[in-house]
Amino acid sequence: MPVLILSSENKELENKIGQKIAQKLEYTTLNQEFFSEIAHKYTLDSKKLMNAMDITPSILKRMPSKQWYYYLSCVEAEVLDCLLEDNCVCWGLAAHLYVAVVSHVLKVRLIGGHNSILRSDEPNMTLDKIKKIIAEQERSRENWSMTAYNCKEADPGLYDMVINLDQVQTDEAVETLSTTMGYPRLKAMTYSKNNLTDRALAAKVKNVLLKSLADVQVEAQNGTVVVTTTSMKRAKSKKIDTIKKLAGQVDGIGYLEVHWNKDMLTEAAMSYR
Amino acid sequence: MAIITISRGSFSMGKAVAEKVAAKLGYGILSRDLLFKAGDRFHVPKKTLEKAIHDAPGIFERYSHTKKIFIAYIRATLIEMVADGDIVYYGLAGHLLLDKLPCVLKIRIIANLEDRVAGRMAGGLSEQKARAMLLADADQRRKWAKKIYNVDPNDAALYDMVICIDKLSIDDAVDFICQSASIKAFKPTNDCIRQCRDLSLACNAKALLVEDFPDVGVICENGNLLVYATEKEAHTSKFKKIMETFQKENYDIYNLEVHTGLSVPANAV
Amino acid sequence: MSNPLEVLLLDDEAIVGKRLKPAIEKINCNVEVFQDPKLAVERINEKEFDIVVTDIYMDDMDGMQVLDIVLKKSSRTKVIMITGYAMISLARDAMEKGAFDFIAKPFNPNDLRVVIAKAAKAMGASIDLNTLLKKQEK
């Protein structure tokens, strides 16, 4: 039941390789086509949802911070739920950023392969121009991933391996990854399944809370959920009660703990009033 | 004729991977013995060469050409030693020294810092000291690569594959590398062999010239050796003597041309 | 009723054996508990167990070595690794060496029963957890 998560700036190759591997191994796929399902389930604007996966929060772009975090939490909750079903190839949903420490998940970054982007119908497009575009995209993605998940998307340490498609052909990459998915070390085990279940539960709780609240972090382990939040002192008990009420509606919680931290900056700002 | 370079931080199990790959493929293996050979050939102490290829240039070095000279020596020796192919090089800066060679499979092995610290501590060091040494080493490597080649050694784009050794096993890494070595892009072709020979000639010529003429650039294509120098340099008797002797000793040189007044091409050695 | 499964449980912490032995015996298993890995290995060499549950980090010998010894003796035996210091690399190593499953502490005894039932199924035996546990309650 291993899961393969791909990440790449080269969306075309990422899609091609993902589809080929899924076909070869008879796995299901989970990619950007999933956005419409998520949007439908949460009654969101699907264009805005897809946009949230590309841009950082900005009033000018009509994506306030609170809404942005909520949109991301919807994607995270649904994707993690699907990954529990296993035997899946996933790409285009930033899963490589929020699925961590799950031993039956193989995370692979694909870089290069820009030659494949050169098209005959775009005569002015040169390899140098494409590289400039890709570099710009990488900067933008780094900004996005730092804001959303506090990690750099291009950091090789996030992945099990990085494959440079400038020399390694698509079919060779497909062959390598397909073989790797059969390795015994990627077999699912109780430890890894529990880790993924914990993450899925935490994501669900976070999603429920972020619909109406801000500034919540959620962790889960073996059914115990810990929610950490920040607010002004006078709003403390109301916020904790709200969290308990909302989180209590989520299935699978054995025990809920809420940790509260004082929002020092707002307190200091308000203290002069 | 695959040439495999394995780049890694200290205590990232790169050596173990390299040894297993070489054993599995029946390839030769090369690391710091390269420095002994280069030292013997160019009469430079091994420690000096090691410093040249490891430490970032100091303030005074930035204004002298000593590092350039020693790196040219190391590179000339390395190219000669790997030109026949079927070799795994796991010494320093292989992916940079061999960047102009085709058919080179460039691998980087990474490991998380905590595991590397634990590995370093096995030598009897305290955790603090081990961590400090590893971070200092990584810093030197980064500065060296930035100063000499203007690249970040942690940039995945420099390599064909980056393998995280604490998430995948050494044996997995060995399998990936051996599998990749057999793919078309890294298989020997006549063109590949010719380019290796050309690069070896260019690097050897550069190694002979670099001490007295550090800014000279050399390209070799199909045995045609092109040397880019200033007018003043090209007219010195020393320059002419070196070039004459080199051409005489190397039968592979079909033609030797010295170009003056032109900027050194980007792909020159 | 099928023959009881022969289970060896190895953990250097006495409380683990004390807690897990009765829990596993409830599902028709004969359980032998060891705290000393060397004694456990001696017993493994004497008798072929169906399932071995072993801790990983122990003083004289670690669970990976026990795993190697068990599988060398009998590839049929299912080895379940348990540890309080679970890491992705350790888990993957264990699976690569042939462990049947890997469980991080702390865990519910029922989690282990579920894994044992799976191991039994993989061996061609069967453990009907619900029926056995209901019987025990009565």
Image: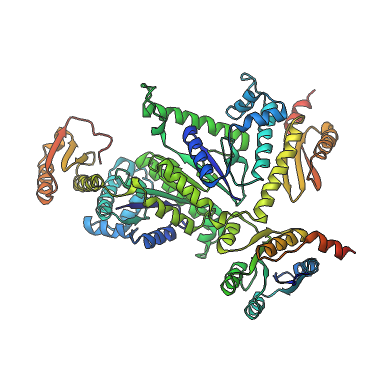
**Residue A223, percent from left and from top:** 76, 49
Q: How many numbered marks have been drawn onto this rendered protein structure?
A: 0
Expressed as whole percent of the image width and height from the top left, the position of residue B167 reads 54, 53
Q: Quadrant of the C terminus of chain B?
A: top left
Residue A238 relative to residue A166: left or right? right
Relative side of B253 to A252, left or right: left
- Does C127 sit above or below residue B222? below
Question: Among all residues in the image, which is located at the extreme right?
Answer: C138
Q: Is residue C67 visible?
A: yes
| Residue B84 vertical position relative to residue C27 in the rendered view, above or below | above
Considering every residue shown, the one lying at the far top of the view is A60
> Which residue: 12% across, 43% down?
B254
Image location (x, y in percent) of residue B255: 11, 41
Indicate how the structure is coloured in the image.
rainbow
- Quadrant location of residue B215? top left
Give the image location of residue B250, x and y in percent.
Answer: 13, 50
- Seen from the viewer's position, the closer of residues B224 and A11 is A11
Closer to the camera, B162 or B178? B178
Residue at x 68% of width, y 37% of height: A78
Foreground residue, C23 or B30? C23
Pick whichever, B17 or A83, lies toward us: A83
State the residue at coordinates (37%, 48%).
B183
One can see residue B112 in this view: no
